[in-house]
Image: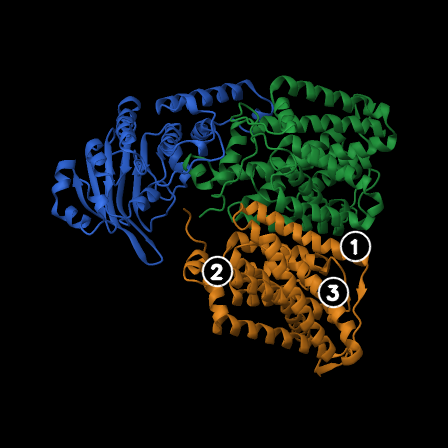
Chain colours: A blue, B orange, C green
């Protein structure tokens, strides 16, 4: 297991969000986490990435303990994420946004920056090249000098993925990457997710409501409902579990587009 | 005088000091509650209140004299005037900034503080102004303990104001709206609560209380000057933090605790009175580090 | 929610700008000077002007300009804290004081050579920055503002109450330094020392801004959570800004003390901190040329306003308020239209 959650419990002010969840992601996999609104999917991302502290349970990533680490440490250890509502540095350029990802893979301090030491200059060059490569990977190289806020929404989502890739992760968490995309964009997102795994060897875990995308891209699906993991397995199998159908009944139609 | 008497005397001194701190701390904490702003100008409203009280007293002393009655009326006038000033400041300076980054609104608050301070500096030429009253030096002798009438009236007035505030906040519709706005402004708007009006009332009350403290301080200490709000502003903030910023009871409690701490702290060997302020700020920093939510404050909402 | 999720236009970055839509002539002028060629020319002209200034102006003007250059150093330092990292520091003069007093005490009371004393002063400022910033930078940003305000007062009270700092009257007869036999003592000598310091502060600011650390400050200022998710330790990054700002302040203080030869607690008052902050806000937080201009305005302005003596500070206060309300990005124009 690359990522493993054991008996993770999370609650806010008495409301239990996650009930003793056991969950895992195998290396080299594209996996989806689905479930109705309010099931606790994003909370689970936040627990994994250190934004929330679970009351109980253990999380390991590649054998290292992850629980109670600060978010920046989690990223340094190799888990990158995107946000449900895109959170780019809006008033900075696309390239500068992607360069943020390289921060944790570089180390020049204030003194070497002030003195412009050769090592610092080489590092800046490396940051630039890696970031440009990530931007190229998501197909937005020509937009590098534009302000992030001026990009089309679909492009902003891609920049966020490029930024996450620039942290050189081993596992990428995508929080509803297809939200707000048109069908063409969704198609190319599927291609992008596959290329992330195939070409860069990064495992992908995504939260998504668009079922056709989930069925199309995932190799394994986990279903979360009311903070409990109610089903797990291959897409076709999960689709037919009675408990999954039950959990989705009563949800609005949009989310029933299997 | 035995150590026991001196302890009691310090308790009395601490209570008086604590009453001032609590009155000013209330304004900080109320404003922080409704708009999440540290109103740096609050200490200067206390100063302005002292000058307004001084002006008010010279207005009414011809008829009412400069005894307790005159001072009381002057204090009410000062509370009214400075309360309105507080509302104007909120409308003109803070309201347009509510959507801006926190840094901008903090600097704006600082700017307001500087405008008040330097306006008073220009008007007084930086000199102390004597706050003359007809208050005597009489008091009660309880054994070795001396309680001046002034101290008694002052603490009692502060107590009455705080009880009135507590009743206002817990019993009236505006008070309830104030607490609701502190919790969720957006929700209040949707429920049809006039959020702007609630904020205005909060500023009015907070500023009025600062003015009451300012007038009483002027009458009690006998002189006022443009810079008098600076230190007390800092200390009242400390009091608010000790009690838990955003909590009204906490501000009262924090004010008293700080007053007592200062009164006793300066009698600890090696901490002379010249180190009093350093002592206070060290307490502030310690509280912020060890328990930033204070005694009665609620913890911040989770991140994200 | 963290407090920085509401981004405002960031200060313009120096390299590779985008969407250049100059509308007014002066904006076009600024853009022209942002491109490398004309910019170099402008920088050279300013340096040249600074060099010849003492020869074409009175001694009085030289002294005033020296003061302005001191402010350039201080303002560029505070700009790293306020402008880049978005932290409000209301006790910046404390670091200025730490630098001045450390050097003053070491040279005047212990006979330490000035140049040997400098590292001690810098380390003292850095330690002070860590002590103050370390615990408070984890908290809400407004707490930092008030803690720094308290810290500024603590430093001033301490200086006033200790014997080693000379109490309320301060330290005098701080010996003048010499460098390779050149005794730095005249007004013109110190003027040149401050020219060098200001240029160094400018270059250091610019280079920091164009570095990994400079970008990290902006990331954290714009969106703390997104920055954390990118592996940026926000507390550490803010602390770096705070400590670097402290060191800039100390450098200003070190040379201030030997320039005047005497220091007293009142040189490091709250007003001093406010004045430095005013210059930074006035020029435009985060914009280096703007901040330099702001420093000059704050020092030269009062010289022009001499007749309004007691109103001077009031005018500044109103100015600060007006900027925040009507032009929060400062007087230096935005590069992007």
Mark 3 Cα-neighbour bin, 10 Å: few <14, some 14–19, many ≥20: many
The answer to the question of whether label 1 and label 2 lie on touching residues, with beta carbons closer than 8 A, is: no
Residue A85 shown left or right of residue B134 in the figure: left
Label 1's element? helix
Give coordinates of residue B37: x percent, y percent.
55, 54
Q: Residue at x 69, y 21 (%)?
A: C42
Q: Chain of mark 3?
A: B
Q: Is residue C221 above or below residue A168?
A: below
Residue B122: assigned label = 1
Q: From where the camera sits, is residue B16 visible?
A: yes
Q: Are marks 3 and 1 on the same chain?
A: yes
Mark 1 or 2, nearer chain start: 1
Quadrant where the N terminus of chain A sits is top left
Q: CA distance from mark 3 to mark 1?
A: 13 Å
Give coordinates of residue C45: x percent, y percent.
73, 20
Q: Residue at x 54, y 58 (%)?
A: B32
Q: CA distance from mark 1 to mark 2?
A: 37 Å
Residue B51: assigned label = 3
The quadrant holding residue C53 is top right
Q: Toward the viewer: B203 or C271?
A: B203
Quadrant where the C terminus of chain A sits is top left
Q: Chain of mark 1?
A: B
Q: From where the camera sits, is residue A234 visible?
A: no
The residue beneath circle 2 is B182
Residue A209 shown left or right of residue C235 in the figure: left
Q: Toward the viewer: C189 or B79?
A: B79
Mark 3 or 1, nearer chain start: 3
């Amino acid at each position: 297991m690359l990522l493993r959650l054991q008996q993770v419990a999370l609650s806010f002010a008495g409301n239990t969000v996650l009930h003793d969840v056991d969950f895992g992601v195998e290396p080299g996999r594209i996996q989806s986490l689905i479930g109705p609104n309010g099931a606790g999917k994003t909370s689970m991302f936040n627990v994994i990435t250190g934004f929330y502290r679970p009351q109980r349970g253990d999380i390991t990533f590649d054998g290292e303990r992850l629980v109670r680490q600060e978010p920046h440490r989690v990223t340094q250890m190799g888990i990158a994420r995107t946000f449900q509502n895109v959170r780019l540095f809006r008033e900075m350029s696309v390239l500068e946004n992607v360069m943020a990802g390289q921060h944790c893979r570089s180390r020049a301090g204030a003194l070497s920056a002030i003195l412009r030491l050769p090592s610092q200059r080489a590092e800046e060059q490396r940051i630039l090249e890696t970031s440009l490569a990530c931007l190229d990977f998501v197909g937005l190289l020509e937009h590098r000098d534009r302000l992030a806020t001026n990009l089309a929404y679909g492009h902003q989502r891609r920049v966020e993925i490029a930024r996450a890739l620039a942290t050189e992760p081993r596992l990428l968490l995508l929080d509803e990457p297809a939200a707000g995309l048109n069908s063409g964009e969704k198609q190319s997102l599927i291609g992008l997710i596959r290329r992330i795994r195939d070409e860069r060897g990064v495992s992908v875990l995504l939260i998504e409501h668009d079922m056709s995308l989930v069925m199309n891209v995932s190799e394994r699906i986990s279903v979360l409902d009311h903070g409990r993991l109610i089903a797990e397995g291959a897409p076709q199998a999960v689709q037919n579990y009675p408990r999954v159908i039950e959990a989705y009944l009563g949800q609005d139609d949009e989310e029933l587009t299997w | 005088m035995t150590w026991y008497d001196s302890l009691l005397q310090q308790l009395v001194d601490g209570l008086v000091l604590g009453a001032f701190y609590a009155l000013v701390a209330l304004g900080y904490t109320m404003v922080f509650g409704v708009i999440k702003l540290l109103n740096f100008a609050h200490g200067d409203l206390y100063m302005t209140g002292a000058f307004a009280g001084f002006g008010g007293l010279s207005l009414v002393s011809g008829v009412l004299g400069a005894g307790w009655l005159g001072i009381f009326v002057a204090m009410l006038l000062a509370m009214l005037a400075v309360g309105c000033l507080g509302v104007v400041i909120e409308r003109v300076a803070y309201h347009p900034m509510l959507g801006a980054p926190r840094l901008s609104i903090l600097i704006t608050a600082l700017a307001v503080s500087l405008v008040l301070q330097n306006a008073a500096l220009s008007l007084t030429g930086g000199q102390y102004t004597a706050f003359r009253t007809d208050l005597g030096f009489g008091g009660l002798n309880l054994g070795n303990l001396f309680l001046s009438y002034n101290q008694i009236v002052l603490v009692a007035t502060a107590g009455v104001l705080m009880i009135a505030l507590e009743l206002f906040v817990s019993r009236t519709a505006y008070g309830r709206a104030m607490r609701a706005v502190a919790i969720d402004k957006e929700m209040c708007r949707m429920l049809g609560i006039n959020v702007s009006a609630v904020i205005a009332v909060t500023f009015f009350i907070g500023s009025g209380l600062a003015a009451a403290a300012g007038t009483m301080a002027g009458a009690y200490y006998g002189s006022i000057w443009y810079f008098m709000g600076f230190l007390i502003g800092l200390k009242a903030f400390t009091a608010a933090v000790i009690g838990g910023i955003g909590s009204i009871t906490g501000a009262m409690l924090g004010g008293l605790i700080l007053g007592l701490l200062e009164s006793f702290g300066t009698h600890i060997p090696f901490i002379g009175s010249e180190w009093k302020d350093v002592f206070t700020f060290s307490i502030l920093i310690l509280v912020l580090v060890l328990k930033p939510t204070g005694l009665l404050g609620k913890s911040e909402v989770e991140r994200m | 929610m963290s407090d920085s999720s509401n981004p405002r236009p960031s200060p313009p970055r120096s390299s590779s700008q985008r969407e250049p839509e100059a509308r007014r002539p002066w904006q076009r002028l600024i853009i022209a000077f942002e491109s490398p060629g004309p910019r170099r020319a402008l920088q050279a002209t300013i340096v040249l002007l600074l060099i010849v200034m003492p020869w074409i102006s009175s001694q009085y003007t030289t002294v005033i300009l020296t003061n302005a250059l001191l402010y350039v150093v201080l303002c560029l330092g505070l700009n790293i804290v306020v402008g880049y990292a978005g932290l409000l520091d209301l006790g910046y003069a404390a670091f200025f004081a730490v630098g001045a007093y450390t050097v003053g005490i070491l040279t005047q009371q212990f006979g330490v050579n000035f140049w040997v004393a400098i590292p001690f002063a810098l380390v003292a400022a850095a330690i002070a920055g860590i002590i103050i910033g370390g615990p408070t930078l984890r908290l809400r940003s407004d707490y930092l503002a008030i803690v720094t305000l308290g810290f500024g007062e603590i430093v001033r009270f301490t200086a006033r109450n200790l014997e080693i700092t000379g109490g309320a009257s301060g330290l005098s007869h701080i010996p003048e330094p010499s460098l390779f036999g050149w005794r730095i003592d005249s007004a013109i000598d110190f003027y040149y020392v401050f020219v060098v310091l200001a240029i160094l502060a400018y270059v250091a600011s610019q280079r920091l801004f164009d570095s990994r650390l400079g970008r990290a400050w902006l990331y954290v200022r714009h969106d703390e959570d997104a920055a954390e998710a990118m592996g940026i330790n926000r507390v550490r990054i803010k602390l770096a800004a705070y400590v670097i700002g402290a060191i800039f302040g100390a450098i200003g203080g070190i040379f201030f003390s030997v320039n005047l030869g005497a220091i007293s607690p009142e040189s490091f008052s709250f007003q001093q901190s406010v004045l430095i902050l005013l210059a930074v806000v006035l020029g435009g937080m985060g914009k280096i040329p703007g901040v330099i201009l702001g420093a000059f305005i704050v020092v030269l302005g009062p010289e022009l306003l001499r007749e309004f003596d007691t109103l001077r500070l009031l005018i500044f206060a109103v100015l600060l308020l007006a900027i925040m309300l009507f032009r929060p990005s400062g007087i230096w124009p935005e590069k992007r239209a």
